[in-house]
Image (tube, helix red, strand yellow):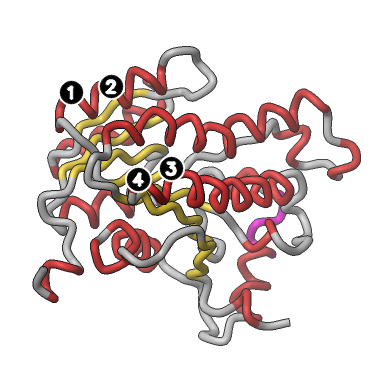
Amino acid sequence: MSKAAAFSLAGKKGLILGVANERSIAWGCTELARAQGADVVVSCLNEKARKWVEPLTAPIGAELMNCNVEEPGELEALVQHAVQKFGKLDFVIHSIAWAPLDDLHGDVVDSSREGFARAVSVSCHSFAELAKLCAPHMPDGGSMLSMSYLGSGEAVPNYGLMGPVKAALESMVRYMAMELGPRNIRVHAVSPGPILTRAASGIADFDGLMATAQAKAPLQRLVTLEEIAQLSAFLCSDAASGMSGQTIYVDGGVHAVD
């Protein structure tokens, strides 16, 4: 393997879930993966989202599918389509998270059992479901990524219910890394600093959260969508072949300071 090839996604086949608009992390990952030579199938939630996403994906040749992981059979259909198109998969990026607004905006102790269960199902367990579907079609191994946040390991004001959910996701990443390692499948959680995505806009006082992060960051700024995509591309490349089971921060250093 040449040193140049190690940092390329050229020829790799990928599946990316969760494109919502031009500000979504999944879109940043899609755009960079295509620029690096990967072939990708990507998903958006439904037809309503599709009108915002298709003008992004069509010009770069990324095939778009609808996928609501709460709807029976849709995740299976998405994976089946990607496998039929490519014959195999080399990387999977899971960038979806959701919780009912009433539960998200309230205190954790006031969250409903149903709302908590749905948040875990969509934001966490769907990653395990995706892995189960994709792993048999990764004969050469590869990478599986999901997206977390600092609120998984410490209590962040207004992050609420999603903190415990992301903590469960990061734990799942470690167990999936252990279980899928013998197949040469690497599993990571990428933990970006706050950026204004559609999902983030549902968090109360998100502007305040971003301001706090910028003030605390050793780099004295917020990270960009491009920087998150660059880390994700690296983890999906052969250059990261010796890494698995980690939560990796791209947050300007906020996680490292008090």
Report the mark closest to the observer, 4 or 2: 4
State how far apart marks 1 and 4 are (Cα).
21 Å
The residue singled out by tag 3 in the image is: 94
**Tags 1 and 2 in contact by the CB under 8 Å rule?**
yes
Q: Could you tell me which residue is drawn at 71 percent across and 55 percent down?
A: 205
The residue singled out by tag 1 in the image is: 84
Report the mark closest to the observer, 4 or 3: 4
Comparing 153 with 203, the one in front is 153
- Tell me the SS state at disc 3: strand
**Tags 1 and 4 in contact by the CB under 8 Å rule?**
no
Q: Position of residue 37 (x, y in %)?
A: 12, 54
Q: Could you tell me which residue is drawn at 57 percent across and 86 percent down?
A: 218
- Tell me the SS state at disc 2: helix
Q: Quadrant of the C terminus?
A: bottom right
Q: Quadrant of the N terminus?
A: bottom left
Please check the rendered image and state whether residue 58 is part of the magenta-colored stretch, yes or no: no
